[in-house]
Image: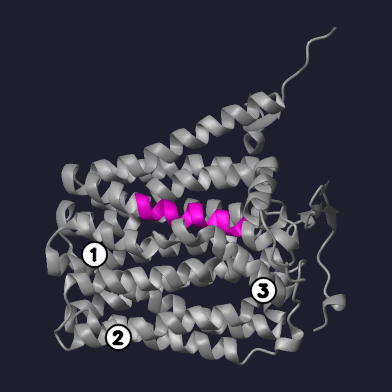
């Protein structure tokens, strides 16, 4: 269907103008989206192919994530080294992130994605062969994790900005939400499948399946109709382009504060594989099957959170702050759950609040960014996201290994909770906002309103 024939219900476009140009419009819906528009982004042929490829790739990726974590634990018996594996996968983003953003803005994003996805397919296939033949050693797993981490660092900014080229601006919010759904659907199916495979035949087959699903993603990218892509104007090489994007991001609250909050959530709250490994191997003693169950419950909660955020009329900075506070509180509760059932329920809550925050933060950041600079701005967002997980892998891994998974969950939730409350206080002070409690209206029991000004 042609873009001109697609409409959204009662949309008002708010655009900001700055020295860099006109910001991408931020759609504010005056009513909930129509049910028939729930998957409106899928009307684009190229995005349908992308979804198919990413669905397989995400299932395989989650399978490998479980398999590699458990493989390192089997090879070394050290939970902290599981955290090191996470760090090696994500640390390259800290080093390559800004330059990956420049690559995204300068070069063909479609070709970049094919190249990075192919690299991951080859090296994951090599690791699978090593494991299945019994020749895998810990250093080999670390090496492959580092190489695929470099590939992911280059891939991520181009992938984020490429969504707009496939679906256009008015479908972008829906596409971002669907991307989150696909990612967490993979998290729902992948760990469960991988946990069963590890129990029956070991880690190697999960890694091999991931290599195969990555190949499907490469094929899907290769079959796209390139003439239908809405390619933005390529940015010419020039000095100071990274500094330009950094200044741009700092000046805009709707970019700056989501990135700040993501830094705390990613560093302390997004290392669930490490905490789930510690809980399954120590606190609850449920083994690989328990690890898969915890990951699947978190992903199921994320799917619920995805559905809830698609029904929201607007995305505001305050809703992102609230999501961080809830996420931190629920994660801390999981650490000191008195009953196993409460722990499992808290994991579902973690999934709901985490996806609510992550999807809203990415959506607000993308819509607040000029198309010509979006790759570089998103590289900062992804650098904080992925790089935070790299640093947090060591921090949370050490905490869980030294003090146990309960303290690990407390730290993972407590730090984002404090960060969210601090940002809320800063924003309230700057905008002179206050909390208003209304006992007569349950639906508006707590509201954020502007503080009354004293009469002069």
Residue 312 position within the rendered picture, expressed as x and y whole percent measured from the top left: 67, 54
Query: Looking at the image, is mark 3 or mark 2 earlier in the sequence?
Result: 3
| Residue at screen point 87% across, 76% down | 4
| Residue at screen point 32% across, 55% down | 344
| Residue at screen point 49% across, 78% down | 116
Q: Is residue 355 left or right of residue 20?
A: left
Q: Is residue 381 magenta?
A: yes
Residue 447 position within the rendered picture, expressed as x and y whole percent measured from the top left: 66, 32
**Residue farthest to the right?**
4
Foreground of the two, 428 or 329 = 428
Majority secondary structure of magenta residues:
helix
User: Which span of residues is magenta-colored?
Assistant: 377-391
Indicate the quadrant containing the N terminus: top left, top right, bottom left or bottom right.
Answer: bottom right
Residue under label 2: 126
The quadrant holding residue 362 is bottom right
Q: Is residue 201 visible?
A: yes
Residue under label 1: 290
Mark number displayed over residue 39:
3
Query: Looking at the image, is mark 1 or mark 2 earlier in the sequence?
Result: 2
In the image, residue 361 above or below residue 115: above
Where disc 3 sits, the SS reads loop
**Residue farthest to the top?**
456
């Amino acid at each position: 269907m042609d873009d001109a024939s697609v409409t959204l219900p009662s949309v008002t476009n708010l655009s900001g103008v700055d020295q860099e140009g006109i910001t991408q419009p931020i759609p504010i819906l005056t009513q909930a989206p129509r049910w028939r528009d729930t998957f409106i982004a899928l009307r684009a042929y190229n995005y349908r192919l992308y979804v198919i490829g990413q669905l397989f790739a995400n299932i395989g990726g989650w399978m490998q994530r479980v398999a590699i974590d458990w493989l390192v634990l089997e090879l070394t018996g050290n939970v902290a080294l599981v955290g090191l594996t996470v760090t090696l996968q994500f640390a390259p983003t800290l080093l390559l992130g800004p330059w990956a953003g420049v690559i995204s803005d300068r070069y063909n994003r479609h070709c970049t994605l094919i190249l990075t996805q192919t690299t991951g397919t080859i090296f994951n296939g090599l690791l699978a062969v090593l494991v299945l033949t019994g020749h895998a050693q810990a250093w080999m797993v670390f090496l492959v994790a580092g190489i695929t981490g470099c590939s992911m660092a280059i891939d991520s900014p181009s992938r984020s900005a490429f969504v707009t080229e496939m679906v256009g601006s008015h479908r972008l919010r829906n596409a971002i939400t669907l991307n989150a759904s696909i990612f967490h659907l993979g998290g729902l199916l992948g760990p469960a499948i991988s946990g069963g495979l590890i129990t029956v035949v070991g880690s190697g087959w999960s890694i091999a399946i991931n290599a195969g699903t990555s190949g499907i993603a490469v094929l899907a990218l290769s079959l796209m109709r390139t003439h239908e892509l809405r390619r933005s104007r390529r940015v010419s090489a020039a000095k100071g382009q990274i500094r330009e994007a950094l200044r741009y991001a700092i000046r805009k609250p709707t970019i700056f504060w989501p990135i700040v909050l993501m830094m705390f959530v990613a560093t302390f709250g997004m290392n669930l594989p490490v905490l789930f490994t510690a809980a399954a191997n120590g606190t609850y003693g449920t083994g690989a099957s328990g690890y898969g169950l915890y990951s699947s419950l978190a992903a199921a909660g994320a799917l619920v959170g995805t559905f809830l955020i698609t029904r929201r009329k607007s995305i505001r900075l305050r809703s992102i702050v609230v999501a961080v506070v809830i996420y931190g509180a629920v994660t801390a509760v999981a650490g000191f759950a008195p009953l196993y059932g409460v722990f499992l329920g808290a994991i579902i809550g973690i999934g709901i609040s985490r996806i609510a925050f992550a999807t809203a933060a990415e959506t607000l950041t993308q819509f607040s960014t000029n198309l010509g600079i979006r790759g570089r701005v998103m590289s900062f967002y992804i650098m904080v996201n992925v790089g935070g997980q790299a640093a947090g892998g060591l921090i949370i891994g050490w905490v869980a290994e030294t003090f146990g998974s309960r303290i690990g969950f407390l730290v993972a939730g407590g730090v984002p909770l404090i960060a969210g409350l601090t940002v809320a206080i800063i924003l309230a002070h700057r905008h002179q906002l206050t909390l208003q409690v209304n006992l007569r209206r349950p639906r508006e029991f707590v509201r954020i309103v502007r503080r009354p000004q004293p009469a002069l």
